[in-house]
């Protein structure tokens, strides 16, 4: 009987948390939409774009470059054994643009940006600064969450494109300089295989990745427990939740994009 009561209590708590999170998401999305058309909120958005986007450039640059270089090293022997080493760029660029670039860039942003958002808002919550903002008649969701969410939605696709570029550049340098692959053939095969569709669909993931990361991190900051331990645990939960959500979104996004591609380009998708 005690076990049944415990299971029921956990179930009720989970349903309550899900409802609270859903209400927070709806308020965040509505406030973000309204803030986007409010010029007085633009300074807040610019400040968050600088903190989220500009300061994330070095880590995104390093991540993208090393992904491309590692792919070149690992895939060269397999292709060279079949006499296809000049097509190494096809494998590198497709993998970076469609999957590795977007996912790894989003994961790095979840660690750097998501943790920072949770810690900042969690500290404000613990020190009752959020309550002070609300007591002055200001909606804390609109003032604190919306600018951060808009900055993530706008900049995550751009940072993914930058990570793709660095991955392509890193793979090219290792392939041509270290592995001595013909540069003209490498570029020609890559240009024939990588389409604008691949680049755009990879970058569009950033909208969903950025939105999920922002809303989860802000929610954990708003609902963290008191004390330094509570803020630290909220940061951990925010990163883990964002990471799992990024992987889940990537899976379902791939299914939808593949269905769209095979619907509008059925002949080419079979080649």
Image (cartoon, rainbow, N blue to C red):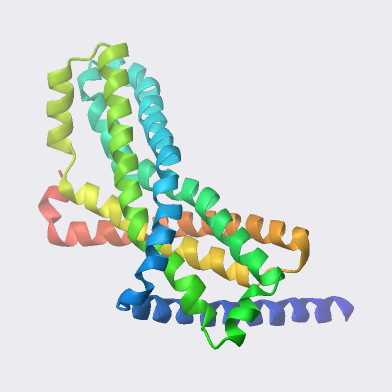
Quadrant of residue 29 in the image? bottom left
Q: Quadrant of the C terminus?
A: top left
Side of 198 where 265 appears, left or right: left
Q: Who's the residue at 73% across and 69% down the image?
A: 225
Side of 28 where 65 appears, left or right: left
Q: Who's the residue at 29% across and 50% down the image?
A: 202
The answer to whether 93 is drawn above or below residue 148 in the figure is above
Q: Nearer the viewer, residue 71 or 252?
A: 71
Q: Is residue 119 visible?
A: yes
- What percent of the width, then of the height, locates residue 217? 55, 63
Q: Nearer the viewer, residue 114 or 107?
A: 114
Q: Who's the residue at 40% across and 42% down the image?
A: 57
- What percent of the width, then of the height, locates residue 78? 34, 20
Q: Nearer the viewer, residue 76 or 69?
A: 69
- What percent of the width, then of the height, locates residue 59? 45, 39
Quadrant of residue 89 in the image? top left
- What percent of the width, then of the height, locates residue 208? 38, 62
The answer to whether 232 is drawn above or below residue 148 in the figure is above
The answer to whether 209 is drawn above or below residue 83 in the figure is below
The answer to whether 186 is drawn above or below residue 112 in the figure is above
């Amino acid at each position: 009987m005690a076990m049944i009561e415990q299971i029921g209590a956990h179930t009720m708590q989970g349903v309550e948390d899900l409802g609270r999170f859903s209400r927070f998401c709806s308020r965040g999305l509505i406030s973000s939409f309204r803030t986007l058309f409010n010029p007085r909120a633009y300074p807040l958005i610019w400040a968050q774009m600088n903190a989220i986007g500009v300061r994330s450039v070095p880590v995104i640059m390093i991540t993208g470059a090393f992904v491309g270089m590692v792919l070149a090293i690992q895939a060269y022997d397999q292709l060279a054994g079949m006499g296809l080493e000049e097509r190494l760029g096809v494998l590198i660029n497709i993998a970076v643009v469609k999957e590795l670039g977007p996912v790894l860039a989003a994961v790095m942003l979840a660690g750097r940006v998501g943790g920072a958002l949770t810690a900042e808002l969690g500290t404000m919550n613990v020190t009752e600064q959020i309550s002070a903002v609300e007591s002055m008649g200001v909606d804390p969701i609109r003032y604190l969450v919306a600018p951060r969410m808009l900055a993530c939605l706008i900049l995550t696709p751009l940072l993914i494109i930058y990570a793709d570029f660095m991955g392509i550049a890193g793979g090219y340098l290792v392939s041509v300089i270290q592995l001595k692959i013909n540069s003209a053939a490498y570029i020609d095969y890559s240009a024939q295989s990588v389409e604008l569709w691949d680049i755009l669909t990879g970058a569009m993931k950033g909208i969903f990745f950025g939105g999920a990361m922002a809303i989860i991190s802000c929610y954990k900051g708003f609902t963290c427990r008191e004390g330094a331990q509570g803020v630290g645990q909220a940061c951990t939960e925010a990163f883990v939740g964002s990471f799992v959500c990024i992987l889940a979104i990537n899976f379902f996004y791939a299914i939808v994009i593949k269905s769209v591609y095979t619907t509008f380009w059925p002949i080419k998708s079979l080649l």
